[in-house]
Amino acid sequence: MNEAFLCLGGNLSNRAQILDDCITLIEQDCGSIVKRSKLYETEAWGSRSKHKFLNQIVKVKTKLNARQLLKKLLAIEILLGRIRVDPSGKKNADRLIDIDILFFNSDVIKSETLVVPHPRLHLRNFVLKPFMDVDKNFIHPILNKPIKKLFKECADRLTVKEYDPINYICVEGNIGSGKTTLAKELAAELNGKFIPEQFEKNDLLPLFYKDPRGYAFPLEYSFLLNRYTQLKNAFAKQTKLLVSDYSFNKCLWFAELNLNKKDFLFFKKHFAAISLQLPKPDLIIYLKTSVKNLQKNIRSRGRAYENNITAKYLSHIDERYITGIQKLDSPKKLVITIKKYKAGLNKELIKNIKEYLN
């Protein structure tokens, strides 16, 4: 059996899924993968592309010789949609998948179609860092140095970080910002599951807008329990990306705005205990727009109980959101400013969100 080390990478479409499909095909057509690195994300090497790459190193045991392996790998690239000749003629162009043979045993091969070891692997941190996961002591047969030494000596300054996949996205925004419509369309675009806030089923909400002081605590506490139950059930059945039009942190931000100091301290303790039982979002998107836009959208949707919402209250909500989101440590945050609502806006926003994710 021969041993080959391969570098898999791509920066277009669903990168993680394509790498997973690539591994399946390698095991099906080439041999068994005995070890693989974590996924790593990096900026494009030798290119100004804004699309970040995902890279992974795998160690394969195969009965194929080097040229047979190369032929199989090229066929897998084509099967996954790779077009090797870029119409623009640019080098290091964006790609769906790229499979490089880094080492084949400890052989040194030089031909028109294949050079092993890969001539530039020692110059690239996106190769060396994941290689450290697989075999940091492997000796480069030409440079006579182990991978760990090559990694230490590498002058490449492109950031290579462990990939943190997005499994849960919250789309947040003030009352009337359009977060529900965007979250629903985003979930459909990303083939995820949409989790809508169930505020319309809460009979306390109309009462709160008539008498905020009298109904603030029962309203906020009911939201706390309802949101917890809804999210807990969604995560228990999670099989795909989840996209909600609210974050659980919203409970705390609205409670701080609506409750008196004594009730808020009580609420905060319960929130802290309950929130520990829920996964944190991987990304929070906040839709920021003017109070004038919010009031126009609120009027257009015609909910009678929202007629008493004041501009001052909407401004306070926005302040709580911005402050609260800034204090969060774990999730990625994307604040999107909307100057004007227009036809086709959500398509533009979703395009920008997808570029951010990639």
Image (cartoon, helix red, strand yellow):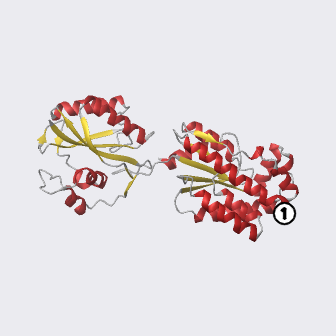
On screen, residue 96 versus residue 342, left or right, reads: left
* Mark 1: amino acid: Arg
Residue at the extreme bottom: 261
Residue 345 visible in the picture? no
Answer with the quarter of the image where residue 301 lies.
top right
Residue 299 visible in the picture? yes
Give the tally of numbered discs. Answer: 1
> Could you tell me which residue is drawn at 11 percent across and 51 percent down?
142
Is 161 situated above or below 268? above
- Which is nearer the eye, 71 or 169? 169
Q: Specify few, some or many for label 1: CA neighbours under 10 Å numbering under 14, 14-19, or 20 or more.
A: few
Q: Secondary structure at mark 1?
A: helix
> Could you tell me which residue is drawn at 30 percent across and 52 percent down?
130
On screen, residue 218 versus residue 278, left or right, reads: right
x, y percent for residue 129: 29, 55
Is 256 situated above or below 21? below
x, y percent for residue 299: 83, 47
Quarter holding the N terminus? Answer: top left
Answer with the quarter of the image where residue 122 lies.
bottom left
x, y percent for residue 200: 77, 44
x, y percent for residue 291: 76, 57
- Which is nearer the eye, 69 or 217? 217
> Could you tell me which residue is drawn at 19 percent across and 35 percent down?
113
Task: Report which residue position mark 1 lands on.
Answer: 213
- Which is nearer the eye, 201 or 74? 201
